[in-house]
Image (spheres, rainbow, N blue to C red):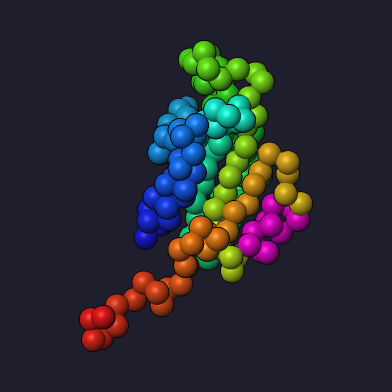
Amino acid sequence: MEHVYEDLVCWRITRDPLIFASRQYNIGGNHSCPDMVALNLRNKEVWIVEVSTNSVPKDLACRINDRDEHWIVKLKEMLIQGNSLVDESWRFIVKAFIRRDVATGFKRMLGGTIPPNVEINIIEDLGFLWSEDWWKWDKQGS
């Protein structure tokens, strides 16, 4: 079901014609494939986008706490060396999309203070409700 929210996030961020996103971008080596990497050409920003519908997004919090080693250093190296568009002036920002009901606990997992290059977004604010009841099919089939 998480892929539905990834689709929604990708659609939302790429409505701007100057933002391009690549899904499951392979950073390589021992690094992970974030849900998306997006280039914001207007603001000269590289966004590392993660979407989690997990009720306890501890793994995501660990990756964000270790974001420089986990994503940013290698991704920055790859994009600067392999792309004349991205250079040292570009900002690298982690954008996490999580459920509203886990937001307070998630912020605690990040140490209580959101770093300046991390943005926490609420899935429900995108206009698509997170509710297990919403996804259940009732017995009458409606």
**What is the x, y in percent for residue 75?**
54, 27
Residue 69, image x, y percentages: 62, 32
Q: Quadrant of residue 35?
A: top left
Residue sitting at the far left: 141
Compared with 134, 59 (above or below) is: above
Q: Position of residue 79 (x, y in %)?
A: 52, 21
In the depicted view, which residue is nearer to us: 45 or 52?
A: 45
Residue shown at 51% from the left, 20% from the top? 78
Verify whether residue 109 appears in magenta. yes
From what the image shows, is residue 28 above or below residue 1?
above
Task: Quarter of the image for the C terminus: give it.
Answer: bottom left
Nearer to us in this view, 49 or 39: 39
Q: Residue at x 56, y 36 (%)?
A: 47
Is residue 32 visible in this depiction of the protein? no
Main SS of the magenta part reads helix
Quarter of the image with the N terminus in it: bottom left
Q: Residue drawn at (23%, 81%), measured in percent from left and top? A: 141
Query: Which residues fall within the magenta stretch?
Result: 103-112
Q: Between 32 and 92, which is closer to the camera in this rendering?
A: 92
Q: Is residue 53 magenta?
A: no
Residue depicted at x 73% and y 41%: 116
> Closer to the camera, 131 or 32?
131
Q: Position of residue 43 (x, y in %)?
A: 62, 30
Give the residue furthest to the bottom: 140
Specify the quadrant of the image occupied by residue 2.
bottom left
Looking at the rendered structure, the number of numbered marks drawn on it comes to: 0
The answer to whether any part of residue 122 appears in the image is yes
